[in-house]
Amino acid sequence: MLELAEVDAGYGSFQALFSVSMSVKAGEAVAVIGSNGAGKTTLLRVISGLLPASAGTMTMQGVSLRTTPPHKVIETGIAHVPEGRRLFPRLSVESNLKIGAYIPPAREKFEERLGFVYGLFPRLCERRAQLAGTLSGGEQQMCAIARALMSGPKLVLLDEPSMGLAPVIVAQVFELVRRLRDEGYTVLIVEQNVRQVLKFADRAYLLEAGRIKTSGTSQQLAESDEIRRAYMGI
Amino acid sequence: MDCQLDIFFLEAVLNGLLLAGLFALLALGLNLIFGVIDVVWICYAELVMVGMYGIYAVDKLGVPFALAVLFGIALVALGGVLLHYLVIRPVLDSAPINQLLVTGGVLFVLQAAATMAFGIDFKNIGIRLGSVSVLDMSFSYARIVTFGVAIAAMLLLWVFLQRTYIGIAIRAIAQDRAIMPLMGVDQRRIYLVTSGIGGALAGLAAALMVLQFDIYPQIGLQFGPLIFMICVLGGLGNMIGGFVAAVIISEFIAVGGSCFATEWGYAIAFLFFMVVIFIRPQGLFGGKS
Amino acid sequence: MKHQVLKHQVLKHQVLKHQVLKGELLKRRWSAWLIGLALLILLPLGVRYGLPASEKYYLHILIQILLWAFIYTGWSLMGRFGLTSFGHGAFTGIGAYGVVLLWNYAGITPWIGIPVAVVVAVIVGLLVGYPCFRLRIVGHYFALLTLALTEFVRLCIVGLRDYTGGSLGTQPARYGDGISLYALQFEPDRVLAYYIALALWLVGLVIWWRVDRSMDRYALQAASQDEDAAASVGIDVTREKLKVTAISAAMCAVGGAIYAQYQMYIGPETVAGLAISLNIVFAVIAGGMGVMLGPTVGAVFTQVLSEGLRVTIQGSATLEKLFGTGALALDTMIYGLLLILFIIYMPKGILGTLMERREKKAHAPAGSPAQAVSR
């Protein structure tokens, strides 16, 4: 579904990604792990168009992402849940969801999807009129994911969903992500919490200093000594 | 100074309230633009002036007033879009002062254009709506109509911003610009739509003002600074704040104007404004400083 | 304490280094300055003999240029540090009306009137500046706040119409034949007026130069970029800003006063209000804000432009036919268009852009020391 080949990207004179190549097949859950500053968030921003790539090719189901303007990437079926949730704080939960359905094809299905999303996240339904800025961390993450789902995506990009959340909430969030998977969404997740994410993903890439260092099935990476030493504290 | 708490005082207070409707409408447009795009149109009052001249010209051609009003609104809405597209966009990422100056340039251009097209004489559309008397107080219908229309327009805008997709997008972009593309929202288009709405509001205000005031090219300088002041007082970008501020300032002007000479009402209003800003720099309801 | 002394020494070192860097530019070219000065001193004689028929007219233009250049230079003291005030019309207004009213109603000579007006302007500037700087009011808010100030002054002027003549303006009462040291009037003798204006302009440049060379300048530059960092180094940001505001207000007040004495007529629109403030800002931007002669170039540009336009338009029969009385507004229109074009394409102004190009050629790695509006 998603193919990246030899992608470079950076901020001004600072290059953050070097020749990154990866792929995500339909129905998969793929993780990108790595330490702070490795370029994980940059990678997602390049895919969703918030940051332009300077070299390489990116395609989503054959459609070239590099030639797609940033606000049209969502129409290729990619929904990006940004780092730090980034809800609109002074809009209600429901308004946040509504803006997720901004693109015309999503507007037609708005009521239907809203019902689906509230079914998936009943707590959001309870708080539908509440201002998004007043939600708890876990609820905000729920709302952010729900907002992404409102556009009816095929691929969901999740940027560090567990960041800044208490461990109990983190477990809930990963439970949610698992459910996404069960509902049939393809997921590309970027995480620092290596242990949790490898438990649920099929495959993973290790990103270090902007380069893909290793890749393989989750099991392979979880068993690798290198990973265990560097990222899991063993 | 003739200032007693008599019926004329009450009349002034109520007239101030009616005036507030117009100012609130004007402030609304400016606040919308600032809240969403983060620019101040120094030439906002001049856009209103253009609307007034447009309505006047079309009316002189024999077009019924209602149609002239629609024309005026459309004209200034287009003006707003052009202003953003041609003049604001190139300097959107520069220092705020550049945006102020560039719209300052437009101010001169519009004043000059109006002078060249219509001359410096005062023009009047000549529609007299008369007035109504309540308990020895007299209120002009024009003012009452203005107030009513202004309130209606504000409510309409509120509904638009709450219910429609574009309205929500406009509110959202003011809160978090960077992630808008992720929702499929084209930022540039939202800015143009907002500019158009800001212009339309100015056009509507022009229609209301044409019923009450003479038109001349410099008229923008009379109320422009006042509107900026009202917006800042209420908190730049805050539409409810703008309304409250409009009421406060209008009362100063109306009451001050009836007790002393007109200028003093304005002068006191400006002084009050400065004092409040010193106490609370972000304005009465302002969030960011 | 020792920490502060050390920082002071570091700043001083930077000053010297900076002066060495700038050595190639205008500042050290004493010969160029002297020649320029000599030319300026001889200029009226040149006008008298070269263009005898319109001597008064050309001298008038030159005087206007010099007076406004002085005012613009005063404004730029604040402007170059990011304190873009739209309210300096208030100070010129206070200067002009203060002097004229004191003379007309209290018979007080401008020699005393001007210092009084300056004191009032400085107090107003400090009163408004202090809360602004303490509360870190910048950008839009600062511009609009100062705009409110100049409007307030303008409204007071119009409101006091029994004394000021309201919107119609007023004149200082002529003393004798119009030339008097006591009354500081000199309008009929254009050559004398020219030298007065020239002296004033030179004083303005010296003030600019002194501020530029002083430690205050570096303090302000640091503050305009990062107030917290500057404050942590021990720079009293508010006090520095107030100092510069006081000087700026004083200069504009004096400028306004001398302008009144020369024009022998003032109106609320001609010396105060939004239009004047926009004029000041535009001229300085057009000329170049961070450079000593920038405001002067701006004055030359704007005065020549408006005169040129006025003459062309009034002389043009076709325009007269097309627009009638409205033709006079054409210069405002062109003025506005130029302002727009300048901001979009040449935000550093004429001189600023020229100097930037020269410096890029001179030293490739070093950055431009000239402060500018755009980032």
Image: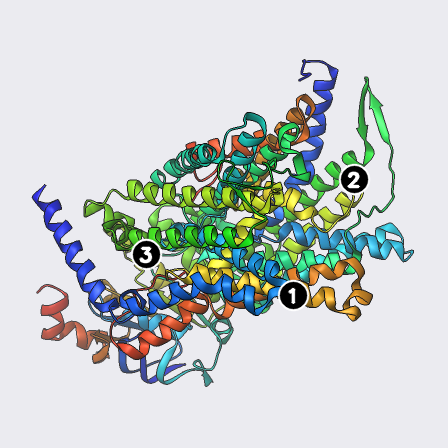
Q: In front: mark 3 or mark 2?
A: 2
Query: Residue A131 location, x and y as percent?
Result: 46, 44
Quickly name the residue at label 2. B212
Q: Provide residue C14's location: percent of width, then percent of height.
A: 18, 59
**Point 37% across, 41% down: residue:** C246
Q: In terms of secondary structure, where does tag 1 sit?
A: helix
Marks 1 and 3: which is nearer the front? 1
Q: Chain of mark 2?
A: B
Viewer-side residue, B257 vs C14? C14
Kindly identify the amino acid type of the residue bearing the numbered disc 1: Leu
Dot 1 and dot 2 residues touching (CB under 8 Å)? no
User: In percent of the image, x 71 and y 41: which residue is there?
Assistant: B150
Left or right of A138, for residue C273: right
Amino acid type of the residue that numbered disc 2 sits on in the rendered structure: Gln
Find numbered disc 2 in the image and state the secondary structure of the residue it sits on.
Answer: loop
Whole-percent x and y of residue A88?
45, 52
Say few, some or many: other residues with alpha carbon within 10 Å of mark 1 (under 14 / 14 to 19 / 20 or more).
some
Residue where numbered disc 1 is placed:
C309
Same chain for mark 3 and mark 2? The answer is no
Which residue is located at x 46 percent, y 36 percent?
A: C114
Read off the residue under disc 3. A173
